[in-house]
Structure formats: C-alpha cells, structure tokens
Image (cartoon, rainbow, N blue to C red):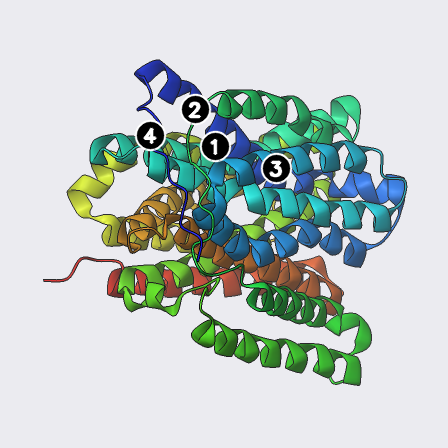
Amino acid sequence: MNQAVVSTPAPLTRARSSLLLTGLALGYFIVLLDTTIVTVALPAIRLNLGGGLHGLTWVANAYTMVYASLLLGMGSLSDRYGAKRVFLAGLTAFALASVLSAAASSLGMLIALRAILGIGGAAILPAALTIIAQTFTDPQQRARALGISAAVSGLALAAGPVLGGFLVDAFGWPSIFLVNVPVAIAAFVLVSRNRLDPARRGSGSGFDLAGQLTSILAVAAITCGIMEGAQWGWSSTPTFAMLAGGAALLLLFARIERRSASPMLPFSLFRSSVVSGGMAAGFLVNFGFSAALFLLTLYFQNELGHSARLTGLDFLAMTLPMAIVPMYMGSIVKRFGAGRSIGAGFLIAAAGLAILTFTPANAGYAVTIPALCMIGCGLALVLPALMSSVIAAAPQGTAGIASGALNAFRQLGATMGVAFCGVLLDANALFADAWVRTLGVTSLLFVAGAGVAYRYLRPRG
C-alpha cells in the first residue's frame, strides 16, 4: 500500500500570504460573479441568439446545475489530491470556456459552454477554501481570511447585475464572459507562485466515481423535470419519468455514499446540527435570491423598459448593502452569535420580499427601493456567517468537502429558484400574477430559513 506523500511547505510571509489570499479571492470572485452577471444580459442574449423565456432559464441554470453537481466531488478532490492543482486547473478551464462563450453563435452552444464554465467554477471555489484552511492555521488569521472570502463572495453577487448592465450596454453581451479572462490570469499567477498544498497520494481509497455520476444525473433529471414540466405537461410521462428518476437516483446516491470507502459526501458531516442546518439554510437563501433576481431583471427591462445599464443601477439598492454589511459581520456575530444573525437576516429579507409581493407590478421603480434595500441587508447578514459557521463546525480534514457541500446546496437552491420562477412565468399569462406568487412563496421560504437558523445554528448549552 502506498504511503501518503507529505512535505510541509515553509510558512508564508505576511506579504506572500496576502498575495495568495488576493489570488484566491480573485478566483472565487469570478466564479460567483458568473452566477449573477448573466441575469442582466438575458434579454440581450435573447435578441441576438433567439429563444424564448424557456431558453433563457436554461442559460441561467446550465452553469449553476453543473456547478452544484460537481462541487462535492471537487471538494473531495481538493482534500485528497491537492487543492492548488485543482484550483489552477479550474481557473484554466474557466478562462477557456469564457472565451468560447463570448464567441457562441447559437443559444444551444451558449448553454453547453455555460455548463463547461460550471465545471471550472466547481473546481475553483472549494479548492480556494481548502487552501485557506490549510495555509492559515492560526485561528485569528483563518477567521480573517474566511471573513475576507465571505466579503468577496457578497461583493461578487452584488457586482454581477451592476457590472453586467454596464458591460452589455457598452460592449454587448459577450463582454460579460470576456471580463473573466484577465481576472483568471491574475489569480493563476498569484496562486501558482506560492509553494503550498502538497499532493497526497495513495491514501488507500480512490475517487468516488459512482457517487459523482449519480449526483450529476439526479440533479440533471430533477432540474430538467421542473424546467420542462410546463412544456411537456405536468402529468405527462416524460415529466413523471424525469422527476421519479431523479428521486430514485438521489436514493441510490445516499446508498452509495453510506457504503463507499471514500464517500464524496460523508454522512458523518451531518452529525453536526450546525452543518445540517447550514445546508438547509444555504439551499433556501439561494433559492429565494436567484428567483427574485431573475424575476426583477425581467421586471426592470420588460415591464419598466429599462436598459441593461439602468437595470444594473436599479439593483444597487439591493447590492450595495451586500457589499458593505459583510465588513461589519465580525462584530455583529461576536455580539449576537451566528444563529441569531443568520435568522435576523432571513427575516429582514423576507420582509423585503413581502413588501414587493404587495407592490403592484406597474408601480414603478421608486417604490421598490426600500424593499430592495431590506433584501440586500438580509442576505448580507446570512451569507458570510453561514459559510464561516459551517466550515468551523466541519470535522478536521473535511474543510474542502464541507465548503463544497454547502456551496452545492446553495447552487442547487439557485437552480431550483430560477426553474421555479420560470415555471410560474410560463403558467401565468399576466406578469403581475407570476410576480405575486413568486415573491410570496420566496418570502415564506425565507421565514422557514429563519426557523432553521434559530433552531440549528445557535450554540447549545
């Protein structure tokens, strides 16, 4: 049996660790940016490449669906074979897929390339968090590094609509993909210059291929069933086959993971109530955020007639708090605790969504500003504290798997949220009806998220 090859690199100086953290932050910045930047560009993509609302939901979801499906496997690979290698390989794939996406000549080609982008993104994010966990061993330094990563995550989600709007109006929709390339190159250079994260060979178990394949097929089947249900008919045989097949594959996945010698998702993770509750909260927060973002983009551009650039500015009321509030999360969590902070964030965002629910769809932009600000403040309270809580509660040596699992649940929520919004838009002839039902349901889900946070994410005793 081969022995693990371990060589401990020399501690990084403060300057080198800062450069390393900058490179990691740039990497996951573009990964998370791509989950939101494309939303504002959807109307322009439709004008150029064709396709209806149904095709646009696939453009939005192809990335998050593949991204969510592979995060678990990539987190496991990062822990097992070296996070630096996985991170750099993911950056390379992401940059190449971005260039090709900008040159896409059909909607189908763009959807396929968005899926490839998801592969690169799934490699980058858990690998970056694993490098942080392995490099910053001092608790204070690690907390600072994770706080910076959480702030960058919020900034990326916030910057997407604004940056996307300006790029689309100034240079066309391909520019939202080309902007990834110089950032990816800079991240590659900064991270590759540091000697860290030695490869770990022959640990006695291999990659969980069966688990990875079943998880991909399960997510794809369920997502396809939901997104195509309105087209095929909810009682049709193809819809039933997709949803039932997805459910059966999920059960098979659980069985494989329980019996696997090297599970992609160790069930021991869920012995911690913080980890279990964090996964549920992550699913709910991204479900609501993505559904609202998709709906509001159509509202601003189709109902109010705003340009892509103006739509990006419209989102500032929501995105500015997401960039500013995380800077104060350390003090907030220290005073109130992670569970209370996350629960309060869910309730504030739920209140904002509820206000929008009772706002007429033709009321104009000005009346939406307070609600958008509340949603942004709420999300800013939830996201950083959630990530830090789950990583801190994960068993030793499973930082990559835990971060991958949390982001997988979050992106599954994002995929289902966009699919859910698309289904309601297809099912309702009037936009106003879809507006009320989508926002009403997402506000209730955020209330449920607050319940999860107060019940499972608060320290015991």
Residue 334 or residue 9, whichever sits in front: 9
Per the image, the residue denoted by label 2 is: 20
Image quarter where the C terminus lies is bottom left
Per the image, the residue denoted by label 3 is: 89
Foreground label between 1 and 2: 2
User: Which of the two labelled residues, at mark 4 and mark 2, occupies the earlier sequence position?
Assistant: 2
Per the image, the residue denoted by label 4 is: 327
Query: Could you say whether the residue bearing mark 1 is in a helix, strand or loop?
Result: helix
User: Which of the two labelled residues, at mark 4 and mark 3, occupies the earlier sequence position?
Assistant: 3
Query: Could you say whether the residue bearing mark 3 is in a helix, strand or loop?
Result: helix
Going by the image, does 327 lie left or right of 87?
left
Question: What residue type is disc 2 on?
Answer: Leu
User: Label 4 neighbourhood size at 10 Å, few (<14), some (14-19), many (20+)?
Assistant: some
Per the image, the residue denoted by label 1 is: 155
Residue 307 visible in the picture = no
Does 195 sit above or below residue 91? above
